[in-house]
Image: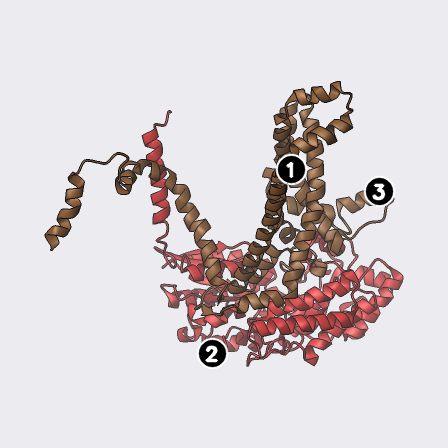
Chain colours: A red, B brown
């Protein structure tokens, strides 16, 4: 078919007009739709499907968002376009939205407070913005635990049952001592993936982080120095494999038993299961050295553009009721935020990946003992400076004291830039 | 009063069109043509010009993306100048640019000369060398991530097989820079080779014949004839490579992505280029004002490089 000049011109005009018309976009969902943003592994597919069948007054449309969910949500909120009715908010991102808590429905106005008793108090509290509005309803938690390879620990002559490990490695110092013994027996094995991960785990064992509730920078205080010193200690004992997380090298290190132990959040078990399937049955879980902490765990919020907030709230509370939280754990290793879920029979199913261990016992104890961590909107920004310098110590052999001084120079500069007194 | 106002244009309309036509009439006469070229300009205005101007506006403000913008005067630029990480990113960018540009242009020249000598399957080779340029950069970065892995990477496996010591590519400063530069070389050598090839084909063959008659060897011909006559093309490639190289972003972002160190450029922040730092500040930290200031900082640097290039070109011409 030959295209005449006139036809071509008309087609071009049509395309331009279509583009211009595209500018008039709705702020939220349209028609019968109720959109829900989540991410891979963020919610149980089984539960979402059941919710879509159960709530028939609307068409529940779960949308899986790839990449940086925070940036994408921010973009849509800034553009007031296609903002989801219900949205997942990652634990480390939710505080970034607190300055704009009015973009979300205050869940207290929908009667959230009567659910408060069902959830872990520290988790419930993290869903509140400093202005008192409740932005996020708890999905899951990330209680920390000590993951270790039973076979490799036994081979090195270390305690290898969860009970023995719990008794023999109650502190970071004792854990590192075990690491030294392990390296004597098998020099290629490291008990620490990298220093940054130790720093993170040690810091999340304390309620105070980098900024206090009044907006004051406290990243130079002893609680931060403690976490730093623990991380540096691992380097001094030569226990770090110096491998960044989420890289091919990290996957390989776990799969090949080069890192046979690691303190990490409950959800990291999902990564190990998918990335090192051949190690099935060889892993065990023990309580973390020096007590519990929490890393990650998400929330659901309802945006102000939602046309039916009451129904949305009903859907949220149903999705996250104790029974469905159990399903989330079974499907996606989302560790429940409601203690009632811990006691459900399905939670006590022996986990074959962990040699038939009932892992919920370890995670539940850890989850109950998490300190009330206060996360300000600036945590990730400041965290970066510590991680950067720790990786210099880890991989480039920078002197730890010089690295600490450089970190302090940097974080004070960043804190000043953000107006943190 | 109204009548006179209405009458004036009407009277003008009645007048016979002057030769060449007034501006308005000319516009109306060429309306179809203007409309035909308008999509590009409209798209450019929306996605090119507006963001540039808006970034300039942003650089004098604090903005987290949702709330109100607060005027910040020159604060963002003052912070930029005092920010050691920004200057580190500038240094990284220049180092990676040098590491990639020098071998790339040398290799491209060799390839172009090889392609220019009459060989079989010329078209096949030209396509083959160009394919890396149109391959998805993210896909390339993921593959190179497996190649450069320290413990389980292909390259280290190869080094081990040769009995050589392994290199921790992605956890050492120069390893990271070499890995990024290698990706750039891999992707852009073929592109530059084709540009050089076009330049080579422009050189008249009688110049070569005369040289050969005078008894010049292959090497002498290359350095005395090919290279001088190719200089404008090489300078063009150099400018294009400068503009591209100073904006290196995807390679370090994907290659060094790690849950703990988001967009930080790996150990020693060795892979933190200016654009990656800009992205980290604007989109990870929601600090759009400062991100805009970084972008304008980069603009100044690119402008400086361009002025140097331009001066060099002018001196050569005069």
Residue closest to the eye, B162 or A193:
B162
Provide the chain ID for the residue under circle 1: B
Residue highlighted by disc 1:
B234
Q: CA distance from mark 3 to mark 2?
A: 62 Å
Q: Nearer the viewer, mark 3 or mark 1?
A: 1
Q: Is residue B122 above or below residue B16?
A: above
Asked where in the image residue A265 lies, by quadrant, the reply is: bottom right
Q: Position of residue A84 (x, y in %)?
A: 43, 60
Check contact, mark 3 vs mark 1: CB within 8 A. no
* Mark number, residue B14: none
Residue highlighted by disc 3:
B161
Looking at the rendered structure, the secondary structure element under dot 1 is: helix
Q: Position of residue B190 (x, y in %)?
A: 65, 35
Residue A147 in view, yes or no: no
Crowd tier of the residue under label 2, counting other residues whose Cα lies within 10 Å: few below 14, some 14–19, many 20 or above: few
Residue highlighted by disc 2:
A132
Q: Residue at x 66, y 53 (%)?
A: B93
């Amino acid at each position: 078919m030959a295209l005449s000049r006139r036809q071509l011109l008309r087609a071009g005009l049509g395309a331009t007009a279509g583009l211009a018309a595209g500018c008039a976009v709705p702020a939220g969902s349209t028609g019968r739709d109720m959109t829900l943003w989540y991410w891979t592994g963020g919610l149980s597919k089984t539960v979402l499907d059941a919710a879509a069948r159960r709530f028939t007054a609307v068409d529940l449309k779960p949308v899986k968002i790839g990449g940086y969910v925070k940036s994408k949500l921010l973009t849509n909120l800034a553009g007031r376009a296609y903002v989801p009715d219900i949205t997942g908010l990652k634990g480390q991102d939710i505080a970034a939205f607190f300055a704009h808590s009015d973009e979300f429905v205050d869940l207290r106005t929908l009667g959230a407070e009567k659910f408060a008793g069902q959830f872990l108090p520290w988790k419930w509290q993290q869903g509140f913005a400093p202005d008192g509005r409740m932005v996020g309803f708890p999905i899951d938690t990330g209680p920390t635990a000590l993951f270790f390879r039973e076979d490799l620990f036994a081979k090195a002559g270390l305690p290898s049952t969860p009970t023995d490990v719990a008794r023999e490695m109650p502190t970071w110092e004792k854990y590192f001592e075990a690491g030294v013994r392990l390296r004597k027996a098998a020099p290629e094995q490291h008990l620490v993936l990298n220093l940054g991960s130790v720093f993170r785990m040690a810091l999340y064992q304390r309620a105070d982080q980098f900024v206090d509730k009044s907006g004051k920078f406290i990243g130079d205080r002893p609680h931060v120095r403690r976490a730093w010193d623990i991380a540096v200690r691992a380097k001094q004992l030569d226990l770090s494999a110096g491998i960044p997380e989420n890289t091919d090298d990290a996957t390989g290190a776990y799969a090949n038993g080069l890192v046979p132990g690691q303190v990490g959040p409950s959800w990291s078990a999902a990564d190990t299961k998918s990335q090192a399937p051949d190690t099935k049955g060889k892993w065990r879980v023990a309580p973390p050295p020096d007590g519990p902490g929490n890393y990650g765990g998400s929330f659901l919020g309802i945006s102000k553009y939602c046309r039916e907030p009451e129904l949305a709230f009903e859907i949220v509370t149903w999705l996250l009721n104790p029974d469905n939280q159990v399903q989330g754990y079974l499907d996606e290793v989302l560790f429940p935020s409601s203690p009632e879920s811990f006691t459900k029979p399905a939670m006590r199913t022996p986990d074959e990946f962990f040699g038939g261990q009932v892992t919920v016992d370890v995670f539940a104890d850890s989850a109950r003992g998490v300190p009330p961590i206060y996360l300000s909107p600036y945590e990730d920004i400041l965290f970066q400076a510590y991680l950067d310098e720790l990786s210099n110590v880890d991989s480039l052999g920078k002197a730890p004291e010089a690295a600490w001084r450089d970190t302090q120079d940097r974080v004070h500069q960043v804190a000043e830039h953000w107006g943190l007194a | 009063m109204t009548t006179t106002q209405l009458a004036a244009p009407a009277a003008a309309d009645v007048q016979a069109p002057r030769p060449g036509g007034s501006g308005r009439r000319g516009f109306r006469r060429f309306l179809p043509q203007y409309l035909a070229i308008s999509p590009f300009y409209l798209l450019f205005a929306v996605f090119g010009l507006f963001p540039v101007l808006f970034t300039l506006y942003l650089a004098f403000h604090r903005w987290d993306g949702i709330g109100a913008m607060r005027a910040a005067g020159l604060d963002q630029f003052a912070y930029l100048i005092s920010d050691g990480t920004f200057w580190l990113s500038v240094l990284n960018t220049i180092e990676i640019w040098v590491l990639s540009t020098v071998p790339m242009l040398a290799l491209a020249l060799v390839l172009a000369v090889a392609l220019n000598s009459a060989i079989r399957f010329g078209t096949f080779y030209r396509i083959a060398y160009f394919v890396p340029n149109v391959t998805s950069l993210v896909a390339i970065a993921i593959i190179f991530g497996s190649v450069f892995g320290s413990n389980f990477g292909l390259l280290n496996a190869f080094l081990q097989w040769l009995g050589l010591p392994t290199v921790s590519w992605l956890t050492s400063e120069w390893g990271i820079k070499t890995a990024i530069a290698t990706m750039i070389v891999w992707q852009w050598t073929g592109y530059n080779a084709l540009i050089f090839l076009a330049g080579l084909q422009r050189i008249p063959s009688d110049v070569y014949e005369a040289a050969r008659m005078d008894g010049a060897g292959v090497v002498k011909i290359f350095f005395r004839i090919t290279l001088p006559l190719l200089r404008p093309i090489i300078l063009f490639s150099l400018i294009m490579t400068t503009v591209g190289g100073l904006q290196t972003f995807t390679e370090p972002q994907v290659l060094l992505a790690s849950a703990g160190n988001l967009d930080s450029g790996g150990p020693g922040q060795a892979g933190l280029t200016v654009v990656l730092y800009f992205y980290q500040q604007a989109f990870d930290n929601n600090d759009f004002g400062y991100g805009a200031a970084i972008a304008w900082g980069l603009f100044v640097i690119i402008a400086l490089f361009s002025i140097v290039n331009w001066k060099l070109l002018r001196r050569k011409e005069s």
